[in-house]
Image: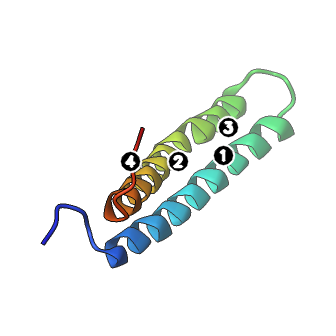
Amino acid sequence: MGATPPKKTESKQRATAVRLLLVGAVLFAIGLVIVLLVDGGGGKAEGIGVAFMSLAAVPTLAALTLAVSAWVSRRSRQDKPFA
């Protein structure tokens, strides 16, 4: 058994990455809508929108990490060089 995960694990990682990316996009969209709907008063509602957009970074970065991990696994399994 090699050090690289099997193909099934790689496909699960990609599927999870897509779901997490979707969650991040939804959170960002909610925050953007809140910021755009609020009059430019700079109140608490605008801060809530910015908080939603900031929270979107967590699942988005996790999705990118999983996608890169799946890509590295595939390249390693195919014995292709990385550089």
Q: Amino acid at mark 2?
A: Thr
Which image quarter is the C terminus in? top left
What residue would you read off at disc 3? 49
Amino acid type at circle 1 is Phe
Residue beneath the point at 26% across and 67% down = 5
Percent x, y of residue 17: 48, 60
Amino acid bearing label 4: Pro
Are the residues tagged 1 and 3 within 8 Å (C-beta)?
no
Please state which of the two labelled residues, at mark 1 or mark 3, is closer to the viewer: 1
Q: Residue at x 37, y 64 (%)?
A: 78
Nearer the N terminus, badge 4 or badge 1?
Answer: 1
Image quadrant holding the N terminus, namely bottom left
The residue that disc 2 covers is 60
Earlier residue among tags 3 and 4 = 3
Which of labels 3 and 2 is toward the front?
A: 2
Q: In terms of sequence position, does the residue under pointer 1 or pointer 3 come before the other?
A: 1
Q: CA distance from mark 4 to mark 2?
A: 27 Å
Q: Are marks 1 and 2 in contact (CB under 8 Å)?
A: yes
SS for callout 2: helix
Give the residue displayed 55% in from the left and 63% down from the top: 18
> Badges 3 and 2: C-beta atoms under 8 Å apart?
no
SS at mark 1?
helix
Crowd class of label 2 (few under 14; some 14 to 19; many from 20; radius 10 Å): many
Q: Position of residue 82 (x, y in %)?
A: 40, 44
Q: Which mark is residue 81?
A: 4
Instruction: State how far apart marks 3 and 2 are (Cα).
Output: 17 Å
Q: Nearer the viewer, mark 3 or mark 4?
A: 4
Residue beneath disc 1: 28
Quadrant in the rendering for residue 76:
bottom left
